[in-house]
Amino acid sequence: MNNKAIKRRDLILNGNILKALLIISIPTAFNGLILSTYNLIDAFFVSQIGSLEVAVITFVSPINSLVRAISLGLSIAGTNMIAQEIAKEKYESTKNMMKHLLVLSLALGIAIMLFSIIFSKNILLSISATDSLMQAANDYFVIMMFSLPLTFCNSAFFAIKRANGETDEAMYVNFVGIFIKVILTYLMLFVFKFNIIGLAISTFIGQLLVTLYAVYDLFLKNSLLKLTFKMSAFNVDTLVNLVLIGFPIMIEKSSIALGFIVINKYILSFGEIVLAGYGITNNINSLFFSFASGLATGLAPIVSQNLGANNPKRAKKAITLSFIVGIILSSIIGVIVVFNSRSIAINFTGDDPELLRQVVNAMRVYSISVVAYCIFQVTNGVFQGTGKTRYNMLIGLVRIYLFRIPIVTVLVNYTELAEYSIWYTMLISNILTAIFAYILYRLTTRNIALVKQVQVADFKKIINKWRSKNEQR
C-alpha cells in the first residue's frame, strides 16, 4: 500500500474523526455530483432537441438503474469486506477479495448485457412503452446496455478505492470523464447528428476510458495492493459473502428502480411533457442530493474499518457527526434549491414554457425533501458499514411499496391534484422513509458490531446434521 493509503488508514482509525469523515465524504460527494452531472448533461443537450427525447431518457432510466442495482450491491459488499481486511493489515487476503469482486462484477455485467439486448423490446413493452416512445427508447436502451460490463467493472474499482479511503482519486477520474463526456455528447448530437443514440455512444466511450484507467491503477501501478492478471483459485466463502452482503442492496436498489417504473406509468397518464419534466427534476435533485449520498458512502468504510479494529465507540462518534453535518448541509441545500428553482430549471428546459412550468412546480414541492433523504442515506451508510445490508433492503422496500406506490395510487385516483399527485408523493414518501429509517437505526445499533461473515463449511455442517437427524428418525 502506498504512503498515502497508509496515512488514510491511520486517519480513519486514530486521527480526528470529523476530519476523516470530511476527507473521505467530500470527494465521494463530489464524485456523486459528477456522476449526477452525466444525467444533467444528457438532459441539457437533449432538451435542445425536443421534449419527446427527454421523455425517452426518463422512461428508460429506471430500467438502467434496475440492472445496475446488481453492480451497486456488489460494490457495497466489496467495500465492506475489503475495508475490514485493510484494518487488520491482511493485504494478501485483501488482494484476493479485490480479484473476486472484479471477476464476479465482469461476469455478471456480461450476462445481464446479453439478456437485456436480446429481450430489449419485451422489457420495454412490459413497462408500458407507448408507440411514440418505443423505437427511440429501444435504440437508446440497447446501446446503453453495451456499456454495462464496463459499468460493473468501474463500480468494483470505485468500491476498492472507497474501502481504502482513497475517494479523492475516484473523484479526479470521474471529473476527467465528465469533461470528455461533455465534448463527446456535443459532437454526437450536434456535429454527427446521432440524436439520443449519441448519448449512449458517448456514455460507452466515457465508461471505457474509466475502465482503462482502473486496469492501470490496479494491475500496472506499483503499490502494496498491486494485482496480477493471474487468477488464484476461487474462494467460495468470499463469493458467498459478496453475494449475501450485496444481495439486500441489490433488492433495495432494484425496488427503487421498480418504484420509478410504476411512477412512470402514472405520469404518462398526464402526458409525455409531464414525464419529461419529472425526469429533469429528478436529474436536478440528484445533483444536489448527491451530497447526502456522498456522506453516507464516506461513512461506510469509516464504520467498517473501526469496527474491524474493535473500536465501536469511534464508529458511533462518526455516525453522530454524519447526522449533524448532513442535516445542516442538506437544510442549506434545500432552501437554496427551492428559492432558486426557476433560475436553475430554465437551463434544462430549452424554449419550452410548459416544460419549464412542470419542472419549477415539481422542484418547489419536493426538492426540500433533501433533508429527509439525507437522514435515511446516513442510516444506509451505517448498515452498509456494519454489513447488515438486510436493513438497507428493508428501508428500500418500505420506501417504495409501503409508502410511495400506495400514496401515488391514492393521490392520482382519489384527488384533483393532477400531476401534483406525483410531486407530493415524492415529498411525503421521503419524509416517512426518513422517520422509519431513523427508528430502525436506533433499535438495531445499540450494540454496534460487524455482521459475522458466513463460511460455506458451516452450511455443510448444518445440512449434514439435519440429514443425520432425519436418518435416525
Image (cartoon, rainbow, N blue to C red):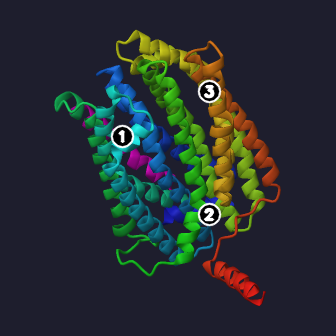
Residue 137 image position (x, y, % from top left) = 33, 35
Outermost residue toward the top in this view: 353
The mark found on residue 10 in the picture is 2
Q: Is residue 182 magenta?
A: yes
Magenta stretch: give its range.
166-187
Q: Identify which residue, 53 or 47, lies in the foreground.
A: 53
Is 275 left, or right, of 117 in this rendering? right
Q: Identify which residue, 459 or 203, lies in the foreground.
A: 459
Q: Residue at horizontal 60%, vertical 39%? A: 292
Q: Residues within 10 Å of mark 1 (few under 14, many from 20)?
A: many
Residue on which the image places disc 1 = 178
Among the two numbered marks 1 and 2 on one chain, the one whose residue lies closer to the N terminus: 2
Which residue type carries mark 2? Asp
Q: Nearer the viewer, mark 1 or mark 3?
A: 3
Between marks 3 and 2, how big is the CA–CA gap? 48 Å
Q: Is residue 169 magenta?
A: yes
The mark found on residue 408 in the picture is 3
Q: Nearer the viewer, mark 1 or mark 2?
A: 1
Residue 341 image position (x, y, % from top left) = 52, 17
Is 314 left, or right, of 340 in this rendering? right
Asked if the residues shown at circle 1 and circle 2 are in contact, with their CB atoms under 8 angstroms apart, the answer is: no
Among the two numbered marks 3 and 2 on one chain, the one whose residue lies closer to the N terminus: 2
Outermost residue toward the bottom in this view: 472
Which residue type carries mark 3? Val
Residue 404 image position (x, y, % from top left) = 63, 33
